Amino acid sequence: MKIAILSRNENLYSTRRLKEAALSRGHEVDVIDTLHCYMDITSSRPTVRYHGDELPQYDAIIPRIGASITFYGTAVARQFEMMGTFNVNESVAISRSRDKLRSLQLLSRKGIGLPRTGFASKPDDIKDLIKNVGGAPLVIKLLEGTQGIGVVLADTAKAAESIIEAFMGLKANILAQEFIKEADGADIRCLVVGGRVVAAMKRQGAEGEFRSNLHRGGSAQLVKLTKEERETAVNAAKVMGLNFCGVDLLRSNSGPMVMEVNSSPGLEGIELATGYDVASKLIEFIEKNAKFNTNKTRGKG
């Protein structure tokens, strides 16, 4: 098969591992810098051009689209879909997952476990917003934040009011969310491929840190999932329409709760923590499912 990996940097661990896994299974692989692609969108035969040449017809693409280039990255992915190329994570699903508010609304509608969450633009009563998510302590998140940036724990209602007012003064979109104390600064990252959890790790925040992100100094180790946790991760991926994603769960007294569904999960942390070859699992999925013009959206938007 001929596979393209849409990535800004071919030396990144995840990109490198996916390329290695595909090559080891006998496939041709090109790593394409998403921002250097440009598209012919006016003809009846859609194409993608790169460094002055028209790109060939690929059997599949693997989009590794960072949050900062979501708009352009999904446009490129959509162009490939219109060309009939199988896309591991379709453009609509990536856009859906990148919108934290939309994601939570969709997960909630399908009955997926979530922390109590409030969203407002200019609430007349900030105290009521805080009360509605269970009061202090509570977590306040920037909608556009990534890797734990823009996530604040407010220990008291007064602190929460001040933080919310400050964010609103900056015209930032924020979520107020219930703090799950029993999680004890840890979460579980589940890697889902093709409707199946292929690896899972427990991430523990550094001492005194409630955020468990590895980028914030957290540690990771192999973890055994319960049946309910496994089902929650798979269902969350299905609701988002993602074939390949990371689902972050919290262990709460009322069962697993989804914190986020990541459409471009990193492989380094989970492969090193679990010893599993996650990259090859994704290539196997492509081998079984990549057929011409089988994307659900087919570039319809």
Image: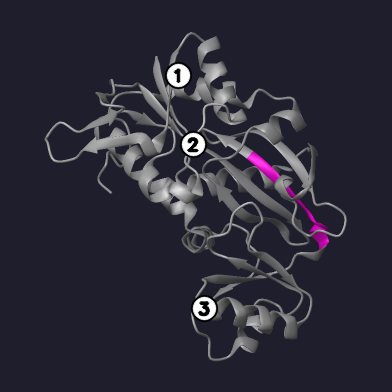
The magenta stretch spans which residues? 182-190
Compared across the picture, whether 190 is left or right of 169 comes to right
x and y, in percent, of residue 107 in the image: 52, 58
x and y, in percent, of residue 27 in the image: 45, 12
Mark in the foreground, 3 or 2: 2
Residue on which the image places disc 3: 120
Q: Gap between marks 3 and 2, in whole Å?
A: 31 Å
**Which is nearer the N-term, disc 1 or disc 3?**
3
Task: Say whether marks 3 and 2 touch (CB < 8 Å).
Answer: no
Q: From what the image shows, is residue 237 above or below residue 16? A: below
Disc ID at residue 64: 2
Within-10-Å neighbours for mark 1: few <14, some 14–19, many 20+: some
Element type at mark 3? loop
Mark in the foreground, 1 or 3: 3
Which residue ends up furthest to the top in the rendered image?
26
Element type at mark 1? helix
x and y, in percent, of residue 53 in the image: 25, 23
Residue shown at 50% from the left, 58% from the top: 103
Please tell me which residue lies in front, 99 or 230: 99
**Which is nearer the N-term, disc 1 or disc 2?**
2
Q: From what the image shows, is residue 138 above or below residue 280? A: below
**Which is nearer the N-term, disc 3 or disc 2?**
2
Q: Amino acid at mark 1?
A: Glu
Please tell me which residue lies in front, 12 or 101: 12
Query: Disc count in the image?
Result: 3
Let me know if residue 141 is in the magenta part: no
